[in-house]
Amino acid sequence: MAQLEIARYAKSTADGNVQETRRAIKDLQEIAKPIAAAVEHETRLAQRLEDVQQLDRYLALAEEHLQVAKERAHADIAPALADTMRPWVPRVTAGRYLDLIVEPEDLQLFAFDANGRKVEADILSHGTTEQLFLLLRIALAKHLSRADESVPLVLDDVTVQADPQRTLAILELLLALSAEQQVVLFTQEPEVVQWATEKLSPNGVVAL
């Protein structure tokens, strides 16, 4: 009997230990759940960070290639733009500026006066600046279009800031261009309308 009691006691103690161990395991599992979730969340964040960093590297590389392409394009087109604009510079500036260059870095315009002084186009008078940038727009339209297509040139009040002499030079430029491409000029100046009436065909002037 004593041995049976001892065995029962041992079993009861063992059962208690098993239950206690199970509770301890369950408690540990409950404690581990938020830790596991935190680890999983941290892993996801780390992956997102890696994805963002990789995207940043790709974008930086693309930006670098685009910058190189831009510099090459500017280097190629800048001299061509200047060559196209150069013959008209003295006429649209009434002889105040005789030449210009187009900087390859940013396509910035610089004009040269009769003394050879180099002047940034942006600091010239408002009218002169507008006239030089009109030449730039015309040159860009010419060189950015395909050789086998004629792109219409649509302009609005480009002579507003010009005196009569420069206005005439601009209109003569546009008339010369119209031999190669369609030129549409919107204007509210009676003098320009009168000039167009005299120089163009009856269908060349439309009152709106």
Image: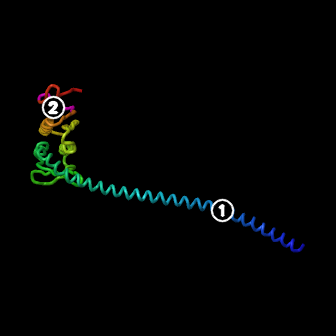
* Label disc, if present, on residue 129 of the rendered structure: none
In this view, the residue farthest toward the top is 202
Could you tell whether 117 is left or right of 63 in the image? left
Kind of residue at disc 2: Glu
Question: Splitting the image into 4 quarters, where does residue 206 fall?
Answer: top left
**Residue at horizontal 14 percent and vertical 46 percent from the top:** 84
Image quarter where the C terminus lies is: top left
Instruction: Pick the residue in front: 196 or 177.
Output: 177
As helix, strand or loop, the secondary structure at mark 1 comes to helix
In this view, the residue farthest toward the right is 1
Question: Splitting the image into 4 quarters, where does residue 199 fall?
Answer: top left
- Name above or below for residue 40 compared with residue 8: above
As helix, strand or loop, the secondary structure at mark 2 comes to helix
Q: How crowded is mark 1: few (under 14 residues within 10 Å), some or many (20 or more)?
A: few
- Name above or below for residue 61 compared with residue 194: below
User: Is residue 197 located in the magenta-colored stretch of the structure?
Assistant: yes
* Label disc, if present, on residue 29 of the rendered structure: 1
> Is any part of residue 169 visible from this angle?
yes
Q: Where is residue 28 in the image (x, y as percent from the top left)?
A: 66, 64
Specify the principal SS of the magenta part: helix
Q: Mark 2 points at which residue?
A: 191
- Name above or below for residue 103 compared with residue 130: below
User: Is residue 51 located in the magenta-colored stretch of the structure?
Assistant: no
